[in-house]
Image (spheres, rainbow, N blue to C red):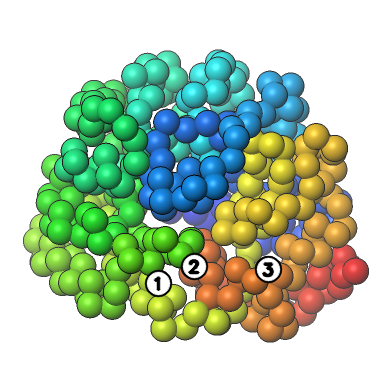
Amino acid sequence: MKDILLNIRRALRLARVINFNPGLDCGPICLDIAVTSRCNHRCIFCGAHSCLKEDISAPEEMPHPMLEGLLEDCADLGVMEVVFSGDGEPLLYKGLPEIICRFSASMEIRLLSNGSTLGLMDQALFSAIGKLTISMNSIRPETHQLIHGYRGEEQFSHIKGHIERLLNLPGARRKLQINYVVCKDNLAEFPALLELARRWNVYFAIRPLACGFAALESRALGLQDLEGIRDVISRFKRQPVSTQMRATLDQAERACGISENRIRDSDILRPCYFGFYWGNVWSNGAYSQCTYCGNKTLGNLRERRFKDMWRDPGIQDRLYAAARLAETGMPVYPECKGCLGPQMQSAAFHRQFRRIPLQSWLLRHRAARYAR
């Protein structure tokens, strides 16, 4: 019930940001902030650190004054949620727990971790966080090390132990989420993964690997693999399951369908509200409207405050152009064609949003205000 009410709030806020925000005093619903690009894992699918890539950039960190100014702007713009994730391991950023505890009263703060730093997650920090998401892409130690690309001893046992420790804290099963990317390397363990999800009774966000660069293509799933995953999900759905497990199975099934669409319909343009709903600020201060084209920046905190960038007519023009992709047939970025984002983050909202009376006219009217 709590999640349903939260999604209704988000949807109403998103409709207001798009349609009724003349002073641009309402910012995006959520902002994804990369406080550091340092990472102790080199996950195969990571665009910044993949062990399959040779061109790894030097690490960068956001200065404390810049981060604090950004969070103050988020509070001024009524940003509902902030996610510390991005292109590095957030808890490697010195002082982040104290910053989270200080700003958690102003907005919900979420954290995405590879699990290696969970030893820093004490009860006080866990209480201050609205959601803790752990990227755990295998449940077998050897495969976990292969996919996460780190050297030395296996870390899966350590990570699993900390997750089970956190599960004993109050409200943990509502607060914890496990992200799991399915690829050729871990496909065989999928039934065992669902058994673990059922035993832990925690929501697992499961999605097939998306090929962000050429070296990943041999590890991506084909249509036959996706059909096999659907069969396993169907078997589990015929059994009595908890609400959390039902959500896990439904999401995994939906993600398989989206991947099938990506394979079959690679050039389709879909309405994208990502820039209004989300937004990314990277460790070098760059701001982009979309996770999937993070190298296309709209500005930088080293030059302007975030709230000034958000209110820039040129940036708003980009956001409205993405919302009207299907109508205009003009991609904002080359990555817009066949992008998974609108299907994963915007599809449910779009089905209801387009039913608003005169919505197409409202969207064109708002877009015309900022058109360059």
Per the model, the C-alpha gap separating discs 2 and 3 is: 14 Å
Q: Is residue 350 visible?
A: yes
The local crowd at label 1, few if under 14, some if 14 to 19, many if 20 or more residues have their Cα within 10 Å, is many
Dot label at residue 305: none
Q: What residue type is labelled 3?
A: Tyr
The local crowd at label 2, few if under 14, some if 14 to 19, many if 20 or more residues have their Cα within 10 Å, is many
Helix, strand or loop at label 3? It is loop
Q: What residue type is labelled 2?
A: Leu
**Contact between labelled residues 1 and 2, with CB atoms less than 8 Å apart:** yes
Relative to 9, 257 lies left or right: left
- Residue at label 2? 340
In front of the other: label 2 or label 3?
3
- Residue at label 3? 333
**Earlier along the polypeptide chain: callout 2 or callout 3?**
3
Per the model, the C-alpha gap separating discs 1 and 3 is: 20 Å
The local crowd at label 3, few if under 14, some if 14 to 19, many if 20 or more residues have their Cα within 10 Å, is few
Q: Which amino acid does label 1 sit on?
A: Ile
- In this view, the residue in front, 60 or 260, is 60
* Relative vertical location of residue 319 with respect to residue 123 in this rendering, above or below: below
Q: In the picture, residue 101 is in which quadrant?
A: top right
| Residue 52 drawn at (x, y percent) | 41, 51
Q: In the picture, residue 268 is in which quadrant?
A: bottom right
- Residue at label 1? 258
| Residue 105 drawn at (x, y percent) | 59, 25
* Relative vertical location of residue 115 with respect to residue 128 in this rendering, above or below: below
Helix, strand or loop at label 2? It is loop
Relative to 218, 213 lies left or right: right
